[in-house]
Image (cartoon, rainbow, N blue to C red):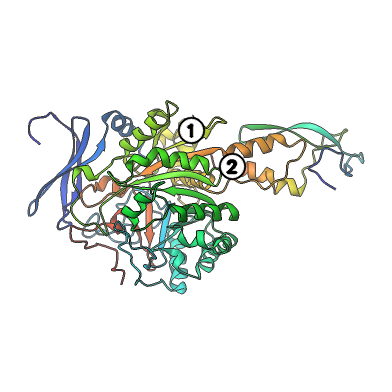
């Protein structure tokens, strides 16, 4: 790292990948890449690329930081971030989407897995799920619930679980799945839909079986098609979720988007997740094993034949900006993208009054909920749910039908960069709004929950067996 | 009876006691305007929105606008 000019973009804190001790870190730019540079007194220096593209880094760094205090503080600040999660008083955002791991069993044994799940895990008893939902509702209010695992569809009682989530008053339920069972058993997905499921968050790594063999250990493309077919029949919206691994499927980013276009309106969005190295990973990753958010944006831009520009993507507005990007597009009759951005909120309540609003007090919703988190939830609910209209055409009401039809021609392209022990920036973690619910009432930020050291040891996640 | 067709439904204005007629009206919500045809009272201008319409496609349009 000697020689080239180093630009400092500020100091933060991170952890040592070997011992997970919290250590100082610095964001530094060398050439066009921003690195996280940190040194553990015991285990030495680690420098990891986190953002390849200074032009977008500049735009993302100037975006508004919307923060809020947790609705409920569940844990005491003792050891410091990231060891007191629950949420603690030092957290700077509320829960938006909360995962419940309903099982640690899985019907795949992927070489890459956040959860290190396998076939011999355990199911969370349904009364414990009920307790978890009650605690979540009391502590966090109206959040989106994602049923996750493990593979949730190994459970025969999943429709009852979806109904339970609804009965507890949650407005939006999504299922994180590999799609195998819902493709094979359309009636199972129909039962989930009847129980109140809104969205299938479908693991979808590419459009060739070679990708699935590398990442998931077997041919799965036909199974993914069947899963989408079942969703179409059940009237459930699908979000394609590719885990991007350099050298495995990064050259299929454009093909995945083309596939998504062809499956609209059932497919509502593509949500890319650059690989992060926690859970089941064979060895310490090299720089070339990582793809960063601007590289995903660049691949989308290059594939779009000039119809997508960097300006069409926005940083996350409730989460830390560097955790995500998103863009919304309408597909015109010739199949080309036309940017269809969300209206800019302009901060608090979409008015200039926001400039004077204090942190976390903007508009003061009755429940103390962050307006930015609420806005993010509305966007997801609107874009990820099915846009299929079952209305029969009616004379005189064409204006309504044209508007609804236009919803079905919208596709969202987004990505979220999860942080591992190498890339973890505690400033980002403190703004995390994707949490994992525990039955004792804690809500653990996703990247803290999944954080593992070089030997796979976790701060929060229990072993799956 | 159907509030969704172009034919004049068999409805009478409760206030004016006149049969409703299909007329072009503008439905507006959250800044968006939709020119549609709905049963109206020719006398007082009362617009009738059937329960089927209100809880069907009109609700879908409203929700889509709210989700923006």
Q: Which residue is mark 1?
A: A341
> Disc 1 is attached to a residue of which chain?
A
Image coords of residue A83 (percent x, y):
24, 59
Residue A256 visible somewhere in the drawing: yes
Q: Is residue A2 left or right of residue A268?
A: left
Residue at horizontal 48 percent and vertical 62 percent from the top: A181
Specify whether A340 is left or right of A321.
right
Q: Does residue A111 lie above or below A333 as drawn?
A: below
Marks 2 and 1: CB-CB under 8 Å? no
Q: Is residue A363 visible?
A: no
Q: Quadrant of the C terminus of chain A?
A: bottom left
Task: Return the x and y of residue A443 as percentages of the image width and height.
Answer: 37, 59
Snapshot quadrant of residue A314: top left
Q: In what element is the residue under mark 2?
A: helix
Q: Quadrant of the N terminus of chain A?
A: top left
How many numbered circles are shown?
A: 2
Q: Quadrant of residue A394?
A: top right
**Which residue is label 2 attached to?**
B64
| Quadrant of res A75 | bottom left
Tell me the crowding category of disc 2: few under 14, some 14 to 19, or many 20 or more residues within 10 angstroms, Cα based: some
Residue A22 screen position, x and y as percent: 17, 53
* Residue A325: x %, y % from top left: 38, 39
Determine whether A396 is above or below A230 in the image: above
Q: Mark 2 vs mark 1: same chain?
A: no
- SS of the residue under disc 1: loop
Label 1 Cα crowd, 10 Å radius (few <14 / some 14-19 / many 20+)? some
Which chain is indicated by disc 2?
B
Residue at the spot x=15%, y=58% of the render? A19
* A428 is higher (above) or lower (below) than A188: above
């Amino acid at each position: 790292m000697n020689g080239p000019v180093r630009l400092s973009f500020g100091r933060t804190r991170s952890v040592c990948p070997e011992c997970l001790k919290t250590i100082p870190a610095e964001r530094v730019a060398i050439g066009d890449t921003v690195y996280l540079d940190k040194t553990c007194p015991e285990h030495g220096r680690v420098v990891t690329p986190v953002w390849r593209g200074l032009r977008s880094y500049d735009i993302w760094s100037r975006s508004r930081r919307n923060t809020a205090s947790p609705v409920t503080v569940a844990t005491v600040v003792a050891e410091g971030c990231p060891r007191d999660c629950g949420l603690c008083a030092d957290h700077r955002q509320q829960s938006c989407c909360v995962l419940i791991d309903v099982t640690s069993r899985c019907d795949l044994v992927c070489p890459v897995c956040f959860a290190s799940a396998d076939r011999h895990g355990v199911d969370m008893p349904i009364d414990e799920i009920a307790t978890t939902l009650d605690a979540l509702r009391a502590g966090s209010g109206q959040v989106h619930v994602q049923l996750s695992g493990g593979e949730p569809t190994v459970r025969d009682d999943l429709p009852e679980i979806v109904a339970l989530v609804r009965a507890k008053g949650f407005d939006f339920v999504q299922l994180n799945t590999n799609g195998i069972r819902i493709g094979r058993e359309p009636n199972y997905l129909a039962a989930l839909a009847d129980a109140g499921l809104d969205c299938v968050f479908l693991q979808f790594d590419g459009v060739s079986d070679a990708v699935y063999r590398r990442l998931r250990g077997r041919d799965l493309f036909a199974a993914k098609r069947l899963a989408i077919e079942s969703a179409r029949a059940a009237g459930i919206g699908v979000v394609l979720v590719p885990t991007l691994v350099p050298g495995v499927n990064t050259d299929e980013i454009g093909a995945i988007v083309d596939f998504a276009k062809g499956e609209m309106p059932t497919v509502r969005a593509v949500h890319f997740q650059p690989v992060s190295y926690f859970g089941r990973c064979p060895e310490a990753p090299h720089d070339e094993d990582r793809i960063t958010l601007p590289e995903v944006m660049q691949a989308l831009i290059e594939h779009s034949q000039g119809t997508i520009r960097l300006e069409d993507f926005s940083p996350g507005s409730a989460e830390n900006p560097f955790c995500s990007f998103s863009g919304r597009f309408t597909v015109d009759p010739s199949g080309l993208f036309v940017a269809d951005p969300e209206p800019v909120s302009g901060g608090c309540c979409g008015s200039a009054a926001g400039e004077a609003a204090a942190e976390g007090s903007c508009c003061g919703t009755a429940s103390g909920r962050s307006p930015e988190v609420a806005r993010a939830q509305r966007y997801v609910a609107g874009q990820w749910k099915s846009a299929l209209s079952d209305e029969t055409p009616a004379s005189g009401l064409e204006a309504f039908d044209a508007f609804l039809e236009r919803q079905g021609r919208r596709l969202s392209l987004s990505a979220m960069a999860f942080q591992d022990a190498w890339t973890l920036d505690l400033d980002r973690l403190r703004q995390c709004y994707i949490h994992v619910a525990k039955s004792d009432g804690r809500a653990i930020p996703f990247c803290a929950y999944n954080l593992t050291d070089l030997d796979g040891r976790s701060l929060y996640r229990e072993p799956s067996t | 009876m159907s509030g969704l067709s172009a034919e004049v439904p068999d409805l009478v204005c409760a206030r004016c006691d006149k049969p409703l007629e299909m007329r072009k009206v503008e439905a507006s919500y959250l800044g968006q305007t939709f020119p549609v045809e709905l049963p109206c009272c020719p006398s007082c201008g009362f617009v009738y929105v059937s329960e089927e319409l209100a809880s069907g496609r009109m609700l879908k349009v409203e929700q889509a606008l709210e989700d923006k």
